[in-house]
Amino acid sequence: MPFRRLGPSGLRVPVFSLGGWLTLGGTVVGDPVKEIIKIAFENGCNMFDTAETYAKGKSESEMGRAIKELGLRRSDLVITTKLFWGTKSGPNAAGLSRKHIIEGMQASLQRLQMDYVDVIFAHRPDPHVPMEEVVRAFNYVIDKGWAFYWATSDWSAREIEEAYHVASVLGLIAPIAEQCAHNLFNREKPEKEYAPLYKKYNIGTTVWSPLAGGLLTGKYNDGIPADSRLANHGDEFKSAVESLQKEEGLTKIRKVKELTKLAEGELNCKVTHLALAWLARNPNTSTVILGASKPEQVIDNLKAIEVIPKLTPEIMAKIEAILDNKPTPVPTHGRPPLDPFGRL
Amino acid sequence: MPFRRLGPSGLRVPVFSLGGWLTLGGTVVGDPVKEIIKIAFENGCNMFDTAETYAKGKSESEMGRAIKELGLRRSDLVITTKLFWGTKSGPNAAGLSRKHIIEGMQASLQRLQMDYVDVIFAHRPDPHVPMEEVVRAFNYVIDKGWAFYWATSDWSAREIEEAYHVASVLGLIAPIAEQCAHNLFNREKPEKEYAPLYKKYNIGTTVWSPLAGGLLTGKYNDGIPADSRLANHGDEFKSAVESLQKEEGLTKIRKVKELTKLAEGELNCKVTHLALAWLARNPNTSTVILGASKPEQVIDNLKAIEVIPKLTPEIMAKIEAILDNKPTPVPTHGRPPLDPFGRL
Amino acid sequence: MPFRRLGPSGLRVPVFSLGGWLTLGGTVVGDPVKEIIKIAFENGCNMFDTAETYAKGKSESEMGRAIKELGLRRSDLVITTKLFWGTKSGPNAAGLSRKHIIEGMQASLQRLQMDYVDVIFAHRPDPHVPMEEVVRAFNYVIDKGWAFYWATSDWSAREIEEAYHVASVLGLIAPIAEQCAHNLFNREKPEKEYAPLYKKYNIGTTVWSPLAGGLLTGKYNDGIPADSRLANHGDEFKSAVESLQKEEGLTKIRKVKELTKLAEGELNCKVTHLALAWLARNPNTSTVILGASKPEQVIDNLKAIEVIPKLTPEIMAKIEAILDNKPTPVPTHGRPPLDPFGRL
Amino acid sequence: MPFRRLGPSGLRVPVFSLGGWLTLGGTVVGDPVKEIIKIAFENGCNMFDTAETYAKGKSESEMGRAIKELGLRRSDLVITTKLFWGTKSGPNAAGLSRKHIIEGMQASLQRLQMDYVDVIFAHRPDPHVPMEEVVRAFNYVIDKGWAFYWATSDWSAREIEEAYHVASVLGLIAPIAEQCAHNLFNREKPEKEYAPLYKKYNIGTTVWSPLAGGLLTGKYNDGIPADSRLANHGDEFKSAVESLQKEEGLTKIRKVKELTKLAEGELNCKVTHLALAWLARNPNTSTVILGASKPEQVIDNLKAIEVIPKLTPEIMAKIEAILDNKPTPVPTHGRPPLDPFGRL
């Protein structure tokens, strides 16, 4: 398993990590959770991502229990969880107030049966809390030893910039990564909006939705199968289901079919592997978070590692031609281009 | 129950909260305390305010015991207490020295049987302690995890300004709110003196004395009834009793009667509700602290919530006309007025 | 003429100011420039906006000459210009390098025949210059006495946030305003993207394109007239012309017609005045920059001042209903709404 | 001519610039200086580098006079000079004391007949002056408007690090570039020692000695010709002459011959062009400073521009194989390598 630094930090994370969203503690409970985590760990995938809100806290408790029962050594693992949505109702039971960050962190650790996580994420921005309070509260969490680093998820570039601003003015620790949706069909935010942040602050990304909700596995190529996420979580993904049947969705399915031809014909792999390797090949990607309902899925997904070096400039150009969705570059307002052989 | 941010913080507080002054631990002890807290909590009023000095510590211990016995979840509550007056005599048993803030905080938490409060207030300013010591000590309290935020009570605008100055220079946390007396007859400080602080620092207010010691309930309209606070706490409120019988007091009573007519005639509510809603309608008010000797009082006071949206600009103008005590605006020394449609 | 503070600064600007884009030094030269400036000044419109790039420097030189010949007192005027596009070609003749900011500022002052401007704008962001260099260079310009304030134009919220970050860390002066396009059809950036900046930094806006290139005057309601900007600057506005003839453009024209009915029927004014007053009524607008080819146009546009107070909540709701383009609010990710009567 | 940013700054410099060392004001004076500068400028080479010590000040005065007589517009030029060696003797006539930096800067500007240079270099480090004094003095120069940026020459990585440290602590402007010797035979400092500085501070390099004193033109392949620099500046370059005749020198000449074969056989250019293009292809090179005694030399050297894109990974590998002098990588003390597809 190849390892990368998580953004500007010294923490090393595997290129592919395992996430608990929807599956662990949700559709998967008990011994199967243990089996999935075991197979992932044995294959070098030692980073496990969860959140207080996944399965209303059960993702954390299942993951924590599984890790404990497997007897894995804490220092061998990279554990990440996220705060924002809470697990209860009530005016202060969610969000990024100092109160919820501290109370929520303690509740998460209790569910995980751990003394600390490696990275604590702010699962969303909270426009009703001043950035100073957020940055101070996450630094408190780090000072308490409850987390080694903090990070963001689904924040805008402006909000991350503001967090750096506050951290810098107060001499506090800034977030090291952003957990963002990134895949062949979702590129604007990770590839364009965050671009200045990679350059200036070296922030990392922990990518979720790498397969666009399964679309990039090709399983929706001929309609929505009965055992798929879109069929089972009907309500939650209603708009996704609907969009699949419209022009936009049909175009995507056509592109998936073309990518499948490329993957099978020229790379000798599934389109899934192409999609995962394409993310992993992006130097700004720190880790791609995989979801799995069965141990076999983990094993299969990790085959993408071998595809990474096969993504030559020529293959990348072919993928780009099929996708036809490359974000436009940041405008330079008529300034002549700089020499591409120098630093830009 | 409507919720508001407490000043610039991310903590959400109910528009009406419950205070322990004079009543809880004082005139009310044992099970009735529990009943009052229970009824308040069930009606969305989840913030409870006390102080080390209320009933010489008994307010804190009664409130703590009641909350424990009711089995309320800590994260669902907003608990605030205050340090300054102490509970014992002795040269260092009160004030805002680092010694008393730290020793007092620990004693309060012990009486409350809690690990932390949400907000710790400096109950008065202390001219004999440098502001740097005060700010540092409250930051120590926050760093220890004993409180999430700190605030002030009955401080002057200049003193709050100094606290912000010191906090900013030292990179420390500034106070988020001021607990001040505010009501239809007491407007100068909250409406004029603090005005620049609302604008610059966004500080909140946790209002005490919302009914002017009962005057605004109308119960002193025809003299001092035997079961009233003014009759029972004779010594403590001697000057208040005396002033009621003078010109100034008689004028106030006349205004209460006019407000009563307005409340009953046009708003279909008691003058008490009008007085409470008038405070709640002020955008600078974070929460209005209610006092109650009986559960029914809480229920009755909370009816003010429905009156808030009834306070239209027209009704507000009528109230202003009856009161005739609006603070004069800050002088601009001849500078022409700015366009009222822009930001001022 | 109503006056407002320009953002967080103490500088007072008229609600309507005069800009030189396209007209002064471009389609209008010589004595007519003088007449337009004279009539504007006599009507209280004492702020004149230009840029090094307008008419390749000729806008500055014409404006400077006219002001000199009119004998207007410098301290009675608010003069703003902008740097970025330069007036010459060459690798360092444009952009926001320290070199161009300093060399460009001196060239602008020479053309204007002035010792200083009131506000110097960065006409665009420059992704190839570190923000520290930009902030330092504009502070140098201020230290030299060549400008009293600096500001931005067409920057993203992230970039303005970064400028504040750098200014704050280095103890330097931050920009006070953003010159952005804002009108009834262009709302996303000024009303949504910048919202946190108004709240946190109190930045002002100097609005350009208030009439959407003339669309909001109604003159394109029945096609493109021969003497209009779209007809005369064909090449430059080609895409604007084309879009007018598509679905999107036709919808806009339909809305202009409905707004015209509202303006004439209920406000007794032209749609132009409604459009201008609507901007001026926005408390975040510091000044709306008018363009004029003839003195009469200035006089006519300033009639919008009387329309501002007529834009009652009811009228505003009708405009909103016609436009149907209100930016969606910032997402709160499921956090319950705060009490609208308190501060948000 | 391709342009690059000079390190982290917004200043754009041509990939090839012209230096005055030894030639301009030295072996070349009068009209020929003008001709060389004219031909360079006409070919896009608009950056001219000199130093107070070159030809004891005569390089600056000749260059200044030539530029003036050619009537070149100042903003079209990038002028750099250097302070350290002084032009006179005396205890304070050289070095990096505040006294010499300020006095020397003024003397240089006088000789150049200019109000400012674009970049002022510290020509050497000065161990007898505290870094704070050096950084403050160069910031004074920039505040006075005498230079837009400052830089270093022949400093160690540790000294540049210290300058950044001091600038950061004091909120002052740090140096933007290092003028260092770099060529196919001199790689240790620019490629290894400075590596962390490129990454952390983005510093640029203005490369001198690109042809290793002429060795890389092939002109010493068969001994030292009578009209060469080594023959004419005998004393100054004595050790260079001697080393050429030893084992080390003979090996270098053998490599030059092999590189010549590669240049002529596969790139259809002279070895000189290969050597210059190899530097220009390094993304950390900001500009390569050329020396010229005749206009034709400038023209010939600039042919290297066309060779840059011909330096494919395959050709680069062949060059590396011939040179066999690649600096060893920074040791990682047993830490496993990071994934090369991620950020390192």
Image (cartoon, coloured by chain):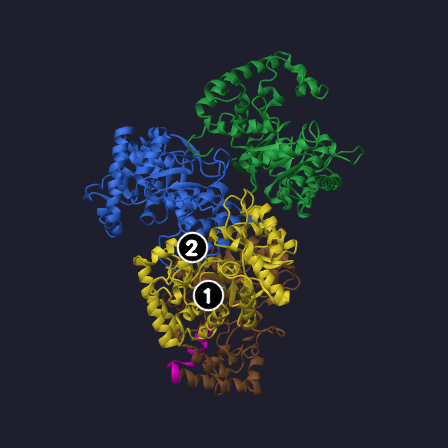
Chain colours: A yellow, B green, C blue, D brown
Reply above or below: C49 against B187.
below
Q: Main secondary structure of the magenta part?
A: helix
**Quarter of image, res B63:** top right
**Quarter of image, res D270:** bottom left
The residue depicted at 26 percent of the width and 39 percent of the height is: C256
Reply above or below: A263 against B276.
below
Give the percent coordinates (x, y) of residue B201.
56, 38
Q: CA distance from mark 2 to mark 1?
A: 16 Å
Q: Chain of mark 2?
A: C
Q: Is residue B180 left or right of residue D302?
A: right
D276 falls in the magenta region = yes
Residue stretch rendered in magenta on the structure: D265-279
For numbered disc 2, what is the local secondary structure?
loop
Task: Report the amino acid beneath label 1.
Answer: Arg
Is residue D322 in view?
yes
Is residue D10 in view?
no
Reply above or below: C307 against A146.
above
The residue depicted at 32 percent of the width and 58 percent of the height is: A245
Q: Which residue is mark 1?
A: A343
Mark 2 nearby-residue class (10 Å; few <14, some 14–19, many ≥20): many
Nearer to us in this view, B294 or D68: B294
Q: Which residue is mark 2?
A: C126
**Quarter of image, res C90:** bottom left
Q: Which quadrant is the N terminus of chain D positioned in?
A: bottom left
Q: Is residue B126 left or right of residue C293?
A: right
Tell how many labels: 2
Nearer to us in this view, D214 or B191: B191
Give the percent coordinates (x, y) of residue B5.
54, 39
Give the percent coordinates (x, y) of residue C13.
42, 35
Task: Report the amino acid beneath label 2.
Answer: Asp
Mark 1 nearby-residue class (10 Å; few <14, some 14–19, many ≥20): some
